[in-house]
Image: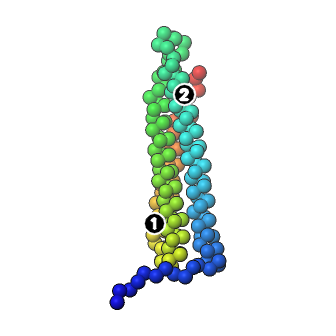
Amino acid sequence: MAKQLMLPDTPSVSQLSHVISQAAAPAFLLGALAAFIALLIARLNRILDRSIYLNQISDQDQARCQLKADLPRLVRRAGMINRAIFWSIIGSISIAVVIIVGIISAFFEIRHERGVAILFVIAVAAFVVSLVDFAREVRIALNDSDHYG
């Protein structure tokens, strides 16, 4: 006889409460990553606005034409912010998968500790990489040549 896959009994309220409480910490990290991504996007928008402004300066405007020398630095900054956004999204996806795996495996009573731990480490590592790119961009942004015009 073939063994049938049977769903476990419906979880009790205490089991669901336990699963939800375990998902709370990753959910807070997911919220923090969402706020961080919003901050990064706002910075990227400022960089793009500045680039548009500098590109609109006429080559005949001798008083402000030297400001265009800042464009390559703005391109580098935008690249760093873009990478920071990418790694923050990777971290967010990993945390979302942690929450999903945790809830599903608790529902089916499957051991999931190692998988969740690996996903959590991936999420935090991606967040660290994102923070490093953000720190590098901030350092470049604080350069004196960005304070003209």
Residue at far front of view: 1
Q: Residue placed farthest to the left in the image?
A: 1
Q: Which percent across, then down, holds residue 3? A: 38, 86
> Between 148 and 44, which is closer to the camera in this rendering?
44
Tell me where residue 11 sits by quadrant: bottom right
Q: Which residue is mark 1?
A: 118
Q: Amino acid at mark 2?
A: Arg
Measure the C-alpha gap from mark 2 to mark 1. Answer: 40 Å
Please indicate, yes or no, whether residue 129 appears anywhere in the rendered image: no
Q: Residues within 10 Å of mark 1 (few under 14, many from 20)?
A: few
In the rendered image, the vertical position of residue 116 relative to residue 53, given as above or below = below
Residue at horizontal 45%, vertical 66%? 118
Compared with residue 132, is residue 43 higher up or lower down, i.e. above or below? above
- Left or right? Give the position of 16 relative to 83: right
> Which residue is found at the position 45% from the left and 32% from the top?
75
Res. 50 mark: 2
* Circle 1: residue type: Ile
Color scheme of the displayed model: rainbow
Label 1: which secondary element: helix
The answer to whether residue 3 is above or below residue 59 is below
Name the quarter where the C terminus is drawn.
top right
Q: Which quadrant of the figure has residue 144?
A: top right
Mark closer to the chain start, 2 or 1? 2
8 or 78, nearer to the observer: 8
Q: Residue drawn at (59%, 61%), measured in percent from left and top?
A: 27
| Extreme-bottom residue of the structure | 1
Q: Which mark is residue 66?
A: none
- On the question of residue 134 being in view, the answer is yes
Residue 141, horizontal then vertical, whole percent:
54, 34
Q: Are marks 2 and 1 in contact (CB under 8 Å)?
A: no
Quadrant position of the N terminus in the picture: bottom left
